[in-house]
Image: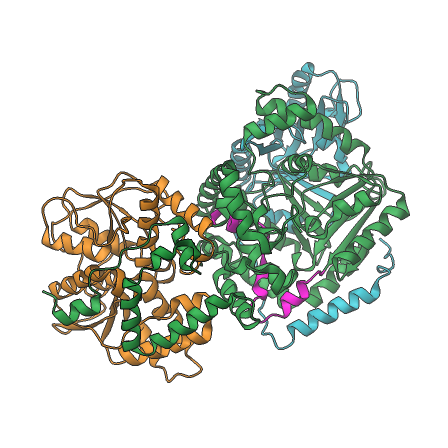
Amino acid sequence: MSGGTTPGRYRAEAARTLAERPSVRTAVTSATDHSNVNRGRAYATIDSERWRDWARDTKTHLLTHLDRYLEQAEASLLRNGVRVHWAETAADALTALSGIVREHELKRAIKGKSMLTEELGVNAHLEGLGVHVREADLGEYIVQMLGEPPTHIVGPAIHKSLADCQRLFHERFGTALDADPDTLARAARAVLREEFLSADLGISGANFLAADTGTIALIENEGNIRLSTSLPRIHVAFVGIEKLVPRLEDVAGFVQLTTRASTGQPIGNYVSLIQGPRRVGEIDGPDEVHVIFVDNGRTRLLADEAAWEALRCVRCGACLNICPVYRQTGGHAYGWTYGGPIGAILAPALLGLEESMPLPFASTLCGACADVCPVRIPIPDLLLHWRERAVEAGLSSTSEAVGLSAFTKAAEHPALFGAAGTLLRWLPWRAGGRALPILGGWLQERSAPEPSAKSFRQLWKDGIE
Amino acid sequence: MSATRPGPLRSRASVAFFATCLGDQFFADACADAVRLLRHVGVDVHVPEGQTCCGQPAFNAGRRREAERMARHTVDVFGNAEYVVLPSGSCAGMIRCFYPELTHDSDDGAAAALAERTYELSQFIVDVLGIERLGTGLDGKSVAYHHSCHALRELGVRDAPLTLLRGCGAEVLPWIAAEECCGFGGLFSAKLPEVSAGMADRKLDTLPRADFVTSSDAGCLLQLSGRSSRRRDGGPPFVHLASALWQGVRGVAGRVEASATGASR
Amino acid sequence: MSATEPGADAGGKQRILGRVRAALSGRSTVDHPGPFESWRPPDTTVQIAVDRFAAMLEAAGGEIVRLPDEAAARDWLWGFSKDFTSAALGETLPEPLRPALPIAAADVAPLGISRARGAIAETGSLLLDARDGRRAQLLPPTHVVFVHAADVHVTFRDAVISMKGDLPSALGLHSGPSKSADIGHIMVKGVHGPGRLIAVVIEASSP
């Protein structure tokens, strides 16, 4: 789980973050404001509707032929001299990693940002094997030093202000408390430079994997992924089975659309297209490249007739950036690797329906996410689907079930409905305050609404001039 | 934006008005203003007895069976109407966008037929009747408009309310968070009150200095006015769009009357 | 390249593929929608492509130098490299484009000089081939990259199609100096790749 909490504690964690750490909301809102403006601008300079249709259709084609493409991908990878592993569960993935570590007696790992490795718990596992692990992405490095999980798919430390970073770097590196960002960056660069040069194991995820050429595509701005997949003698790439695309040409389209959706850039500053280990005649590059294909619940999601479209996700973070619920707290409150809208539609399949509660309900179904998703995942529809499944499984509250059942009965009997409405308006329920189920939640944060002196029904009967 | 008429209308269209459950109890005066407004633009209005709730709260809570029952009831009550008009973007959206799929198993096409004839108030006036100027009653007034998510994204209603407000002489002020969710979300507001309040705060903290704030959705207005009142903002009044537009027709001098502000008592 | 044997967990592979097939049974399929076409002006001359490449790279913080031929490039390099004590060089740099500087390892050299395989106009990217040597492309804080105008592809897709039959172990698209906004949302350069990227476009083809 993420940062010592679980989805089940979402309300409490969200409330605590808002009450005790208001700077998180400020920092997250500010960072995502920038991202949203940039994404909007980037979409406006292209025919974004057509690009998004193309991306949706290409990923849907891929997913509906996934077995064929997985086999083609493996054949391409093997042809390139890549070692391929298949992991049904997180445990299998970590076992494969252990095998590689032991085979090569690896001691020092350097990592590029990968949400899949967070999902699997790779860092803790490596440390358990006695391997030193360093996150090389600056944002990941910051949260690693703080002992926190990343708060966002793309910007792991967006919940930290400049002042937070200054304090942290002062404690760790002795930089001045008022050091400017360039000075802090130089300090991090120097430390991480040593890590790149001394690591024997480089770990990455994969943004995309082209089945026809076996190319692993990785997008970044800093260069840490290029370095961590080039300098250490062993490179291990963790690849979710849904990350495939049919052809290398498709990678060209997906890279450009994903970076526009994510940060508003026409392309990431560095894109690595990795075919395999260093070749005869090349002077550097890893001796071995391993791909670990990971299922970990993805086939369960694929089997769900209503929810499988979530597998189109390219992990751009656009839905997090636009989500008015996510922006209140950042990612930690969700208690899992993936938060925000995408987290809520993945969790029921990858974590389990009960374990994912109440995430599918942590949304007003406002629909802003669907407006921006580059692969057109109908997120509100999927949230509704998981809510219905939760109700069927008996996972929603009894008082809500009883209340809605009574409400529905009344709604089918207009006289009863009218009478109940009148009663509600005159009963001193406000005096019950926060102790009331459901209504108490309203009164905790808002004044009670004033009912109209007469109902509209009554006004109509009386005659409207 | 465009005042397109879908075809020649009979001289007086007949509208069945659906007040909605929140409208009936908390925005009765605004509903009355909506009736007055519709009559003023040349429409026959009747209010079918037996109307209760469109079923959206149950639907959004994942309770499909309950929602379907309320939908069936609503289809029966409104079945024969030429047009159905609601002073609510989210309820109109529920009927237009979700009724056909919700009742299709038990249905004879009545729900789909109803959906096609159902409109939110401002959408009906601009897109069906082709009317953009109602009067000059809001001359000199500045307004902040909150777009309810369902009106905006389900119904696709963005310009109609603004066109009508401006058509009455109001200035619609820029509001950076105008299209962001207010945090109501039906039961969400009560089940996750802290986050809901944070979302309302985001709206209120960025609110421009306007004479009044308006929206087509009762739930949104209760959320924003209720939070504003708890914060003791002393900010502008919250007025339902129907009342704002009726003021635009009548041009009552002075301050725009508030229909429901959730003022603390 | 000889094939290595498949992963030892062949059982895992078959189970995963089995579950994929079971999940998809009865699901209607969608055809591949075809090529993705993006930026392409009506006339795609070399000049237009280079202009676009230059504009995109500069917008991302990179620098452009445009020179008529290799001789001019050699002269420019001679002047530019005077400020540096040593350089790490790409394996595929032609002799005329090697500076008169001591050669140093990439992890200590202040300057790295590479020869790009090509560039992409649409995205403002240099195509850096592993065969030129990755370390010199990544470690020195200042990076000079020579590219021929004729090797500037119009789109990313064009570049892929052109290179597909001859891919190295790794290809890097470098589209600007290294940057990050992870510290308080403020942009900094040079973490971790080169903080200064200079693309030198040689208009004439090499002999």
Q: Nearer the viewer, residue A4 or A282?
A: A4
- Magenta part of the protein: which range? A295-323
Q: Nearer the viewer, residue A231 or A276?
A: A231
Residue A381 placement, left or right of C177: left
Image position, residue B37 (x, y; %): 15, 61
Q: Quadrant of the C terminus of chain A?
A: bottom left
State which chain is coloured cyan: C
Q: Is residue A38 above or below residue B85?
A: above
Image position, residue A287 (x, y; %): 85, 43
State which chain is coloured orange: B
Residue A300 is a magenta residue: yes
Colour assignment, chain A: green
Q: Nearer the viewer, residue A30 or B260?
A: B260
Q: Is residue B20 visible in this depiction of the protein?
A: no
Q: Is residue C25 above or below residue A256?
A: below
Image position, residue B173 (x, y; %): 27, 42
Q: Nearer the viewer, residue A225 or C206?
A: A225
Q: Is residue A312 visible in this depiction of the protein?
A: yes
